[in-house]
Amino acid sequence: MVEYSYTVTNPTDTPQTIETLIRTKEDGTTANITDLAPRRVLAPGESTTVTESTQINICQGTTFSSTVKVTMEVPAEKPVCTDTDTYEFMPKVPCKVNVTITCVLDDGSGRVCGDIPPPETNDDCEVPVRYTFEVANIGPTDEMINSLVRTLNGEYKDFTEDLDDTVIAPGKTVTVEETFIAGICEGEEYVMSAMVDANSPDGTLCEDSDIYNWEAPKYCDVDVFIECKDSETGDDCDKIPDATTESECRKIVEYTYTIENPTNIDQTIESIIRSQDGNTKDLADGEQVLDPGAAFKVTETAEVDICDGESIDTSITVTMKPPPGGDVLPCTDTDTYSFNPSTICEVDVKVSCVTTDDDSIECDKIKAAVNPEDCSVPVMYTFTVDNVGPTTETINTLIRTLNDQSKDLTGLLGDDERILESGTDTTVTETMTLEICGEDRVFEMSAEVNASPPNGEPCEDSDMYDFEVGKECDVRVDMVCVLEGDEGVDCAAIPPAESASDCKQIVRYTYTVKNSSPTAQTVESIIRTQDDETKDLAEGEQVLAPEGEADDSLVLTETFEVDICDGDSIDTKVEVTMEKPEGQITPCTDEATYSFNPPTICE
């Protein structure tokens, strides 16, 4: 049962009277429901609501709609005043379906497939079975079966066209049967699944599935299991921790082989064959008879190497004699236990550097050159890779980087040199000439090594050798520019001129010259260049104290009138040169630049 509400509102500023209120249903039938209105005369802004109840069937997949049209009374000379509204809905129809699989021995006995008796002879190895697939409509409406498919051990089959009827009424069922010959002498397992897909009248989809598994019985059957323990700690072998020293690489482990008789008759063990690293051994000691449900255990110990990276694999195969009087094959079972503890990888790389001249010294003790012939210094870098882990390691890569320039040194190692036993090392050397008189006198050499153990994650290490060749003369200059009279505005942030009078601006440049050396220095020149015009701002000889002391800096300022409306970049550069001290090959210099170009407004 549903209830419709129709609300009529007078949105005008004068009273109005409802003349007619006509309702139309989805089937086209109409009704005059004017008399159901509580009020027909509506004041300005006033509303009145008409309600109507009706019973509908929501299981037919039908769209329900109701349209109401209101007409207001108006003077004869005025146009007709009407309004219409529609409410439409389609309830979702439930869809519920169920599929069930049953399987019986197709010999009239009614025995379910899971209870088929074991074969007594090879003639009993094949039996007829019958599967029944029942589809039930458990929903409230008729349902259309779109598909019914089954899968037996991965083999697919569609039964949709085999259904007597694909439209099922509520509470009704349809069935499909399938028969075939099943083999039961080799421990076969039959995995049967079925899936049904259906829809209700409005197209709502639903599906269901079922599964029926059974395993063929056997007179002869056996189960075998392997356990492996660390003889010292009792840990499972696959939980043995990584060796951290070479002495921990050898382990004594104990294997336990458990043979179980899962049948309801006595069985005799014929053989227990253990295989490990290509070696086999029969562990059976004469004929061992197992009662139904009984178990028999055999243990043995072995010394294993957990650091060689090889998987330690042990398998056991048990064969039982067939029961006397039966014409069935012997039965076997196999289990395998494997473990391969990961090996710890630890590698260390060191970088060293010495000069190769007659007075060989460590590179970080190289002094500043005092003669031009001292500017080129021959050196030799040595890269030493040491295996500090417990196992053999193989060097994958050895990369060195000097001042951001990288080189792969791996190829300089022979195949034998890349394989390091625990506690051994290998070295690579590289000779070169360093130029120590240039501006860049810092030499940063780093090395990175990547290595792998026999089994486990690779490991890495790195080292760095840095040194700087000093110089007696060193200087640094910085420059800033601000709008004169407004210290907070950097020249690069000057706003566009809003009028022609704003085009000319006064800016102030500040140049800071700082002595960056450990000794006092004398300023030789401070050359400022702007718009191809240069000027030396140095005023006589200005001595700057060593870095860190008072008076180690010199600050100069100058102002310019600049035009920010001509669209040209305003570029300024300052170059500082210090007097060359005695023994210094070249004077030291530094420079700074400042450019700005405010945008111009186009109006």
Image (spheres, helix red, strand yellow):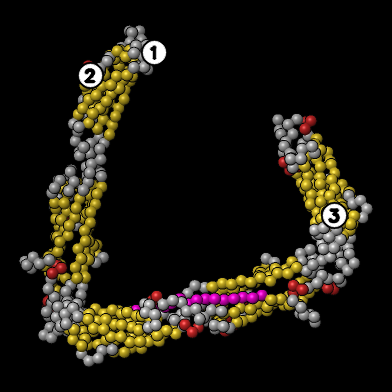
Three-letter code, disc 3: Asp
- Choose the circle earlier in sequence order: 1 or 3: 1
Q: Is residue 595 left or right of residue 151?
A: right
Residue 193 in sight from this viewpoint = yes
Which numbered tag is attached to residue 36? 2
Residue 433 x/y as whole percent? 76, 74
- Choose the circle earlier in sequence order: 2 or 1: 1
- Choose the circle earlier in sequence order: 3 or 2: 2
For label 1, the residue is: 13
Is disc 3 placed on a helix, strand or loop? loop
Q: Tag 1: Cα neighbours inside 10 Å, few (<14), some, or many (≥20)?
A: few
| Residue with the most extreme bottom position | 286
Q: Which residues are magenta?
A: 337-351
Judging depth in this view, the residue of 338 and 423 nearest the camera is: 423
CA distance separating discs 2 and 1: 25 Å
Closest to the camera, between mark 3 and mark 2, is 3
Whether the magenta-drawn stretch holds residue 373 is answered as: no
Number of labelled discs? 3
Three-letter code, disc 2: Leu
Is disc 1 placed on a helix, strand or loop? loop
Which numbered tag is attached to residue 551? 3
Judging depth in this view, the residue of 338 and 329 nearest the camera is: 338
Contact flag, marks 2 and 1 (Cβ < 8 Å):
no
Q: Is residue 348 above or below residue 532?
A: below
Residue 54 x/y as whole percent? 19, 29
